Amino acid sequence: MSIENIIPKKGEVWFLWFNRCSGIVLKTPSRTLVFDPAEVNPTIFRKVDAILITHEHYDHLDVPLVRSVYGRTGCQVIADQTSVRKLRDAVSSDKLHAASVGSDFKVGEVHIAALGFKHPATAPVSFLVTTEDGIRIYHTGDSLPFPEMKRLGEQTPPDVVFCTVGPPAPGASPQTGLEIVEMVHPKIALPYHAPASEARRFVDLMSRKTPKVRCAIIEQGKPFKYP
């Protein structure tokens, strides 16, 4: 379960879904980002430029795991404000960055914007990543759809969106995943944070409701390339 040896070409990105929740490795031609690392062996992350954390719940934030990865890689850590408070003893202050809605960050030539989030956490954020080649990836964490997503779809629709489509995220379902797609108008939607049965239901809904948007079921531990 690794994309360590994959070197993306110009204009492409690779993903690896590594847990049952919203844990994603994103690899661009120059940078490796890890989202919400939890419920996984930290030794699979050998080269990391930044860890991004959406909120403080146990299936998205694992402080000992972040400490381990940071200690081996010296990566930046960008996290919601509640998670930052929990990480102050694990990550040095010069590498730990608090994200709130509207914050912007740079990791090399990769741009990261912190956006809103609908979920029963303290101050969660989602992330819109723009790669050095201009590919936009929207990592929604396990957010439900909310009105600001529509503005994103009107102004800067992402190429790729990750949609929570089922449990254990409260209130999430294939239908709420479809609502996200209908708001943000991506080129491709990738369901996650749900069992395979819910992902298949999501694909079926999309084929009937949004046939112009591509959809793919990603498998845990299996690298996926876009485009």
Image: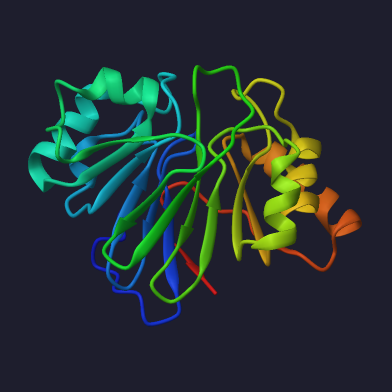
Instruction: Please determine whether, in this image, residue 70 is positioned above or below residue 47.
Output: above
- Which quadrant: the C terminus? bottom right
Coloration of the structure image? rainbow
Residue 197 found in image quarter: top right
Whole-percent x and y of residue 196?
64, 40
Count the marks: 0
Quarter of image, res 147: top right
Q: Can you say whether 104 is above or below 57 in the image? A: below
Residue located at (40% from left, 60% from top): 111
- Residue 166: x, y in percent? 67, 31
In-image side of 109 versus 169 (left or right): left
Instruction: Using the rendered image of the protein, determine whether residue 30 is visible from the camera's viewpoint.
Output: yes
Q: Is residue 185 visible?
A: no
Give residue 8's position: percent from left, percent from top: 35, 75
Q: Position of residue 80 (x, y in %)?
A: 40, 30
In the picture provided, is 115 more to the left or to the right than 79? Answer: right
**Relative to 226, 210 lies left or right:** right
Image quadrant of residue 223?
bottom left
The residue at the point 74 percent across, 32 percent down is 173
As drawn, 10 above or below 225: below
35 or 106, nearer to the observer: 106
Q: Residue at x 78, y 46 (%)?
A: 178
Q: Residue furthest right?
A: 208
Outermost bottom residue:
10
Residue drawn at (77%, 36%) of the image: 176
Judging depth in this view, the residue of 63 and 1 nearest the camera is 63
